[in-house]
Image (spheres, helix red, strand yellow):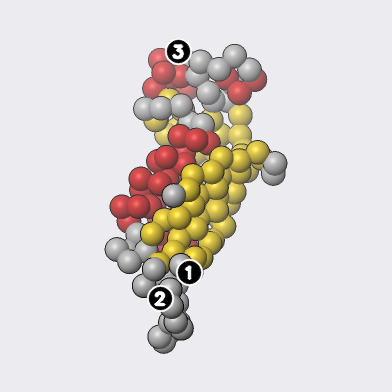
Amino acid sequence: MLALAKIFHFEMAHAIHGYEGPCKHIHGHSYELHVSVGSTNHADGYIPSPGFVIDFKEIKKLVGDNIISKFDHKLLLSNAFLQVHPGVEKLENLVRWESEPTAENLLQYFREVLTEKLPAHINLLQLKLFETKDSYAVWHL
């Protein structure tokens, strides 16, 4: 199988409702998202012209339109958090979420979106989301 990966960066704030540590407060991260895709169509030989499994520009547009544009410079908070902190609902960059906005839940959402939007011949292989330079969550087949 041939695989490709593209790395994306975005800034986002969140808070984790129900957590007893400092992450229960609104705080931000500089996220790094690694998206790996592949295709079994060309496993045994060279790829005919133009020679791509998928164009990196297509991955960039798909992830940019469906993930980065929705989360970059946003404040992502769960409905449970907002019930306890109703004054926050007035912020213009707020994105409401059903679940807690952990790295794990973000990856589940990204997986759902990308699996639906990728071309039929392309498989999502792995997602890796860094919250800090040394802490990340991974989803993979």
Lower position in the chain sequence, tag 3 or tag 2: 2
Pointer 1 and pointer 2: residues touching (CB < 8 Å)? yes
Foreground mark, 3 or 1, reads 1
Q: Is residue 26 visible?
A: yes
Q: Is residue 108 above or below residue 53?
A: above
Q: Which residue is mark 2?
A: 42
Lower position in the chain sequence, tag 1 or tag 2: 1
Lower position in the chain sequence, tag 3 or tag 1: 1
Residue 2's disc is 1
Foreground mark, 3 or 2, reads 2
Q: Residue furthest front?
A: 44
SS class, disc 2: loop
* Residue 58 location, quadrant: bottom left
Q: Which residue is mark 3?
A: 84
Q: Report, in whole angstroms, how far the alpha carbon at label 1 lies from the one at label 2.
A: 7 Å
User: For the point 55% across and 53% down, which residue is it?
Assistant: 34
Q: Position of residue 124 (x, y in %)?
A: 41, 56
Pointer 3 and pointer 1: residues touching (CB < 8 Å)? no
Looking at numbered disc 1 in the image, what kind of residue is underneath it? Leu
Dot 2, crowdedness within 10 Å: few (<14), some or many (≥20)? some
